[in-house]
Amino acid sequence: MRDSAPRSDNMPKASLFGGAMIIGGTIVGAGMFSLPIVMAGPWFFWGVAVLILTWFCMLISGLMILEANLHYPIGASFNTIVKDLLGSKWNVINGFTVAFVLYILTYAYISASGSVLSLTAINEFGIHLPAKIAGTLFAVGFAFVVWLSTAAVSRVASFVLGVKIVTFVLTFGNLLGHIDPIILMNSNDVDASYLPYLLMIFPFCLASFGFHGNVPSLVIHYGKSPKRIMAALLLGTLLALVLYIVWLICAMGNIARVDFKPIIAAGGNIDHLIAALGGVNTANWLNIILLIFSNFAVASSFLGVTLGLFDYLADLFGFDNSPLGRFKTALVTFLPPIVGGIIYPNGFLYAIGFAGLAATIWAVIVPALLSKQARIRFKTSTFTVWGGSTMIYFILFFGIINIIAFILSNLNLLPIY
């Protein structure tokens, strides 16, 4: 398959590993902490089955964006493609859902940071720091970094990512060494029921595979080389899927299914999960590593999401890059989620669910419609997602299932474990 539009061949080949890391790094973040909590009902095997289905559908929807993107000049944004193929109304809907996802995730990470910092303050320093105050301080501190410059964010993000990787390896290595197969398979509960809780986890799994805004960036990175971009998307999403499954093994192999009930009853925030995991080993330094990992995982996700939201709002409102302009942007970026974190500090799990609902629009339904319309508009293509119209309708059906699951869950029409 050869591209009609140039890349060129004179340009040095961009690293496949680098592109995969962009995708994998975008996907894996603090949202992973929600997975074992929401999957306590269907438990490990059914939860992993939905996770794999979600991975497949999100990969295909990402490739559908690529299919549409390749008909446009390199550098064309997601919004440009949506507006041209689907019209202004869909572009407004798409823009709103993107902003909503970024806002709700900013709030979710403020909520998560508050609970984790509060737990850290109590466990390590004996200081009682209310979660809402801790979350506010966290947000204000990082808002200052974002206000300074993108370069400042990059330097802080590099440090945060480095610490996260080191503590990630140490944390997972420790937890994997304490897995109990009886706990993981829930063997002691012979009358356990799993399927009634299956539908509610769909939006949370969907929210855990958000990378679609990066597809146009990969086109810039690689040029119009669909095979390399497809390989980067496949490797990056597979990396995230494997890490999620390992994380579920670690959590569900150390915490019994019944012990998730008090975590869920307390709102499902990260601090309760971390406290439960911290109890599987008496070595204090390992508990400290777990706390450091959770703090830096939240910080890493927070920086990535808020920088994207900051740039989006600066463009939307026309704020310039001067100190005053950046201050205005920082204000509209951080103030609403900070106020939300003060009013409702324990909304991490609910926020991830809402993010899944909004992400269904721009990461599932819109890509399927883009692919459908691109095939009507353009008679020739250098890349077409396999499966024909059947695959398009399958992805749309997957999106509808996620929306139905979210609505039924919030109307309390689905069983809660």
Image (spheres, helix red, strand yellow):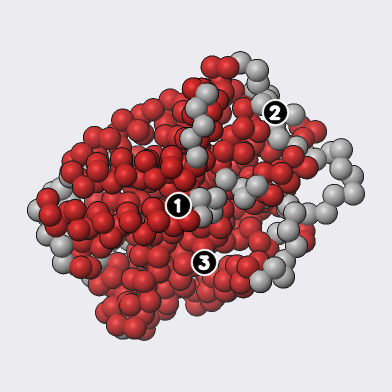
On the image, which quarter does residue 211 sit in?
bottom left
Earlier-in-chain disc, 1 versus 2: 2
The CA distance from mark 1 to mark 2 is 37 Å
Nearest to the observer: residue 329 or residue 310:
329
The answer to whether residue 366 is left or right of residue 352 is left
On the image, which quarter does residue 213 sit in?
bottom left
* Residue 90 seen in render: yes
Q: Which residue is mark 3?
A: 357
Q: Secondary structure at mark 2?
A: loop
Residue 275's place in the image compared with 215, above or below, is above
The CA distance from mark 1 to mark 3 is 23 Å
Q: Mark 1: which amino acid?
A: Ile
Across and down, in percent, residue 291 comes to 51, 29
Q: Mark 2: which amino acid?
A: Ile
Q: Residue at x 68, y 63 (%)?
A: 199
How packed mark 2 is, by other alpha carbons closer than 10 Å (few <14, some 14-19, many 20 or more), is: some
Nearest to the observer: residue 71 or residue 36:
36
Instruction: Mark 1 vs mark 2: give the one in front.
Output: 1
Nearest to the observer: residue 62 or residue 222:
62
Q: Secondary structure at mark 1?
A: helix
Earlier-in-chain disc, 1 versus 3: 1
Across and down, in percent, residue 96 comes to 36, 71
On the image, which quarter does residue 99 sit in?
bottom left
Across and down, in percent, residue 112 comes to 49, 44
Q: Mark 3: which amino acid?
A: Leu
Residue 209's place in the image compared with 140, above or below, is below
Q: Which residue is mark 1?
A: 342
Earlier-in-chain disc, 3 versus 2: 2
Q: Residue at x 62, y 39 (%)?
A: 272
Query: Can you tell which mark lies on residue 179?
Result: 2
Image quadrant where one finds the N terminus: bottom left
